[in-house]
Amino acid sequence: MRSPGRSSTPNREVPIPSEETLAVQQPHRTLSFNEAAAELRRLGIAGPHLYLLDAIPLLEMMWADGRAEQVESDLVASFLRDHVDRLNQLAGAEVISHRDASEFLRRFATRRPEPELLELLGALVPEISFRSSDPQANRARRQAILDFCLQIGAACTPLSSAEARSHFESAERECFWRIVRELELDDIAGS
C-alpha cells in the first residue's frame, strides 16, 4: 500500500476533517510534535511532506477569494523551492526533494481543498514548524511566511475599486489576519 503523503495522483480527494479533528483548532491548545504529526498523517501528510507545512498559510491565501491565479501558484512554488533549498542546506543532505514539493503543491493547488481542511492544517503549522530552540529562527520563518502571504494577497487585481485601494479583497484580508493570529504574531498586528 502506498504511503498517503507520497500519492502520485495529484487530484487525490482530500478528506474532510471530522468534528473531533476540528477540535484541535481550539485556541490555546498545544499539541506535542508527535500528536500533530499523527494528525497530519491521518490527513495524508507524512514523510517529507511534513517539512512543507510552512506553505499551508500561503495556500490559504491563494484560495481565500475562492480562486487560484497562476501568479499566486507561482509565488507558492517559489516559496517551496527556497524552503526546500534552505532545509537541505541546514541538514547538510537532501532530506526533501523539489519533486516532493511539486507533488505537495499539486495536491493543494490543482483543485480547491475544503477551507476547513486548510484552516486545520494552518493551525498545525506552529506545532510542527516552529519548534526550534532558537526564537530568532522561529520568528524569521514566521516572517517569511507572512511576507509571501502579503505578496500572494497583492498579486491579483481586486474585483472592485474600493478593494483596489488596499490591493486585497476582503476575503484575503480576513484570511491574512487569521494567519497572523494562528502563527502567534499578534505583536505585528499592533505595529
Image (cartoon, helix red, strand yellow):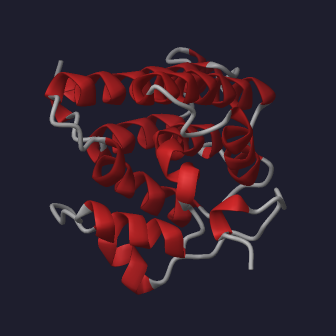
Q: Is residue 180 left or right of residue 30?
A: right
Residue located at (54% from left, 36% from top): 58
- Say which quadrant the N terminus sits in: bottom right
Q: Is residue 78 left or right of residue 128?
A: right
Residue located at (35% from left, 65% from top): 36
Residue located at (64% from left, 22% from top): 78
Image coordinates of residue 173 in percent, x first then y, are: 45, 34
- Say which quadrant the C terminus sits in: top left
Image coordinates of residue 161 in percent, x first then y, are: 63, 19
Q: Is residue 121 left or right of residue 177?
A: right
Asked if residue 159 can be seen in this view, the reply is no
Image coordinates of residue 30 in percent, x first then y, are: 19, 62
The quarter holding residue 137 reads top left
The quarter holding residue 12 reads bottom right
The quarter holding residue 74 reads top right
Residue 109, compared with residue 41, is above or below; it is above
